[in-house]
Image (tube, helix red, strand yellow):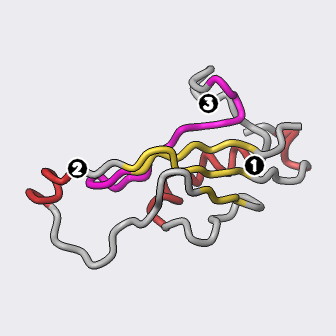
């Protein structure tokens, strides 16, 4: 946590779906049929304001990325010592083991 960021306004964070994967073999073997699965589409984008879950983003995906969104909103970054080319970003996947979605998180204003 960056103590200097405590008094700064929170930055908006863009959340963009980059890839959606479906593991049909795992679904067939282990999943009970469900009525409504994830309906996120590649390229779909959300904006977190005040480090809050954007409307339309499922709770499960949000729980997977919330800590990263909160850190980025506070102006933090450079996760895992240079993991991302853009230090004000992260690539996070939701925790659905049958149909994971990879999301690119980035602050909209790095200033």
**Residue 56, picture quadrant:** bottom right
Tell me the magenta residue range: 85-100
Question: Under tag 1, what secondary structure?
Answer: helix
Q: Which residue corresponds to the image point at 69% horizontal and 44% vertical from the top-left?
A: 71
Separation of marks 3 and 2 at Cα, in angstroms:
29 Å
Magenta-colored stretch includes residue 54: no
Separation of marks 2 and 1 at Cα, in angstroms:
33 Å
x and y, in percent, of residue 28 in the image: 11, 59
Q: Can you tell which mark lies on residue 81? A: none
Magenta-colored stretch includes residue 93: yes
- Residue that mark 1 sits on: 73
Q: Which quarter of the figure is the C terminus placed in?
A: top right
**Can you say whether 83 is above or below 7 in the image?**
above
Within-10-Å neighbours for mark 3: few <14, some 14–19, many 20+? some
User: Are circles 2 and 1 on residues that touch, CB within 8 Å?
Assistant: no
Question: Under tag 3, what secondary structure?
Answer: loop
- Residue that mark 3 sits on: 79
Mark 2 and mark 1 lie on one chain; the one further toward the N terminus is 2
């Amino acid at each position: 946590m960056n103590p200097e960021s405590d008094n700064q306004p929170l930055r908006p964070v863009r959340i963009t779906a980059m890839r959606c994967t479906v593991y049909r073999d795992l679904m067939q073997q282990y999943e009970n049929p469900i009525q409504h699965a994830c309906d996120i589409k590649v390229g779909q984008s959300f904006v977190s304001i005040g480090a809050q879950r954007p409307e339309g983003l499922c709770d499960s995906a949000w729980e997977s990325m919330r800590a990263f969104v909160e850190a980025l909103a506070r102006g933090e970054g450079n996760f895992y010592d240079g993991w991302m080319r853009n230090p004000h970003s992260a690539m996070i996947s939701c925790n659905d083991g049958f149909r994971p979605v990879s999301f690119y998180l980035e602050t909209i204003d790095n200033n």
